[in-house]
Amino acid sequence: MQTAYSSHLWRYALILVAVGLALLPVVWMATMAFKPHTEWVSTAGDLHWLPREPTFANFEYIFTGETDAYSITHERTATRPIISSLVTSLLGTLIAVIAGTLGAYAVSRFGVGRNLPLGVLQLRLFPPLAVMIPVMIMWAFIGAMDSWWGLSLIYGIVTLPFAFWLMKTFFDEVPREIEEAALVEGCSWFRVFWKITLPMVKAALASTTLFVFILNWSDYVIALLLTRKEWVTIPVYMNSLSSAMTGQMYGAKAALGLIAVVPPVVFGIAIQKYLVRGLTFGALKQ
Amino acid sequence: MSEAATKSGRPVLTPLETQGKLLGLYLTLPAQLLLLFIVAFPLVMQLYVSFTWWGPLDGTPWYMAYESANLFGNYGDLFDDSKLWGSIGRTFLIVAVCVPIEFLLGLGLAILFAEKFVGKRLFYSIMLMPMMIVPAVAGYMFFMLFQSSGPINDLLSRISGTEVEILWLADGTLAMISVMIADIWQWTPLMFLILLAGMVGVPEDQMKAATLLGANAWQRFWRIVLPRMKMVMIIALVIRTIECIKIFDILYVMTGGGPGVATKSISVYILDLTFKDLEWAYVAALGLFILICLSVFAVIGLILMQRAQRRNETMPA
């Protein structure tokens, strides 16, 4: 009894330390987002973890490019990059989920497209930077550089492996008997897929969509290579927010960072159940 | 359709099967087109360009690159490129330090979370959070933390009681350590998640039987849980190693590869070649070289996985 109690105590102590460490950087950024610029950096050990005078000036600054609190103005606001991130991530997700779901069903049921499972997996293996030269040449050639559709298209292909493998494991789990019964009734294969199987994996499809969206939203390097000005996404914009003239815009960048991390964290917690399956390409199920 | 199939000696397909196969071909079409358009075609193009000196400022379109063909010139240069080998070395140093630490920390956390306790769900959700943070933003978080007047030095000052002003990101070794800490922070949760999933899969009756036979917690873990988790561990290590070799976002935001070249990984080196030096043909060759190396590594990983799986299947239940 005594040992069980003390081992519980140890467990909680260790877990609290781990949780604290996991939260520390996030908390620092979140509080920084509400600090006025006098509190951004400490002078002579005078560092405060919580803002003494909380302010929304940082948010005002990134959305309007100016605020009474700071003398520096910024002509490019964060509105465009946020829209760009949303549009390209959503469209990319749509492409990946549609192509992945259809392909996964075909591979799972009919044994066609045998090259697909490994073909899409190898997409994930390579560092994007090592294979982007021909894509950049192509994109310049067809005028897709710095365009919403060019970035969406590449997002669609980069996250296709996740959509494909996740949906394949879900389709593999649907009992064949139900489909066979409908086929005996005279249903066509397409109607079986559309009216019976797809509704059965509805929840899984939604989780896959959120999962793929998180991945697209998190991208930095592809947007860095394929956008210049009009369609830069949040991370690219964020990194350009400091200059020699303005110095580090800690508070403003933290405010933008906070906006950027909310969607993936919320969605990620919502689909916790399928995270293992998604991240291991279906090799492991929880 | 089925008549033709009979003539060629293949098994006869029923009309329904034929219909299914046909539908299957249609359904795979989008994925196949994407693969062809963005994988197969670019790879051929990359191979072509890699045999030339072509660059984006040459004034000739890429398909005329053959005019400056040099055959294996770029590939030969790879072996004399000391900056390349330096960045490969640094990347592997990061992998060699981060992946084992993430693995051990993840395993420790998974052991802590293996049993039921109050608040488990909440703590579990919080523990998963770091890996959902946009990596570039995570890089910026750590950039702020490691400022000389930032909270890390502040904490150290409070603990030690003296003024600590370490320039974390301005010193080569310390910058490398900072980047490693950031990577470990972000990706330990992934190891934890995968390993915990593997741990939960161990049949409970086996654990009970072992307890009845007098096995202590350590023996139970070492003799029953661990062997069953071999497959999961290999998956976690392979996935994490592959991702860690690609390390870019977090590192680039924190240090930009500096100070000097102290934290320049393969990806940062390639980015510099692409944008600063504009040596696209050389990057194409370098990219293909990396592809081949990683493919070899992936095949080894797959073989290990299959071997572990086979052993799991033959293991008496």
Image (spheres, coloured by chain):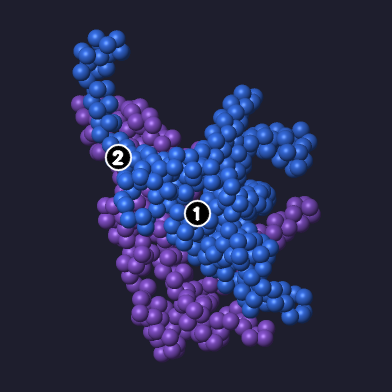
Chain colours: A purple, B blue
Q: Mark yes or no: residue A54 visible.
A: no
Marks 1 and 2: same chain? yes
Amino acid type at image mark 1: Ile
Check disc 1 and report the residue beneath it.
B270
Q: What label does residue B240 carry, if any? A: none
Q: How far apart are marks 1 and 2 (CA)?
A: 28 Å
Residue visible at 62% across and 27% down in the picture: B311
Task: Give the crowd class for mark 1: few <14, some 14-19, many >=20 residues within 10 Å.
Answer: many
Q: Do the residues labelled 1 and 2 touch (CB within 8 Å)?
A: no
In the image, residue B57 lies at what x, y percent? Answer: 37, 57
Task: Give whichever of B45, A178 is nearer the camera.
Answer: B45
Residue at 22 percent across and 20 percent down: it is B15
Judged from the image, the secondary structure of the residue bearing numbered disc 1 is: helix
User: Where A165 falls versus A146 (above or below)?
Assistant: above
Q: Mark 2 lies on which chain?
A: B
- In front: label 1 or label 2: 1
Query: What amino acid type is highlighted by mark number 2?
Result: Leu
Please say if B255 is above or below A143. below
Q: Residue A106: x and y, percent?
A: 32, 33
Left or right: residue A177 versus residue B130 is left
Q: Is residue A13 left or right of residue A239?
A: right
Q: For the point 58% across and 58% down, which residue is it?
A: B264
| Residue plotted at (77% across, 75% down) | B160
Of A281 and A141, the residue lying toward us: A141
Q: How many marks?
A: 2
Q: Where is residue A20 in the image (x, y as percent from the top left)?
A: 63, 65
Q: Residue B33 carries which label?
A: 2
In which chain is the residue bearing label 1?
Answer: B
Q: Where is residue A285 in the image (x, y as percent from the top left)?
A: 50, 40
Tell me the SS state at disc 2: helix
**Residue B80 visible somewhere in the drawing:** yes
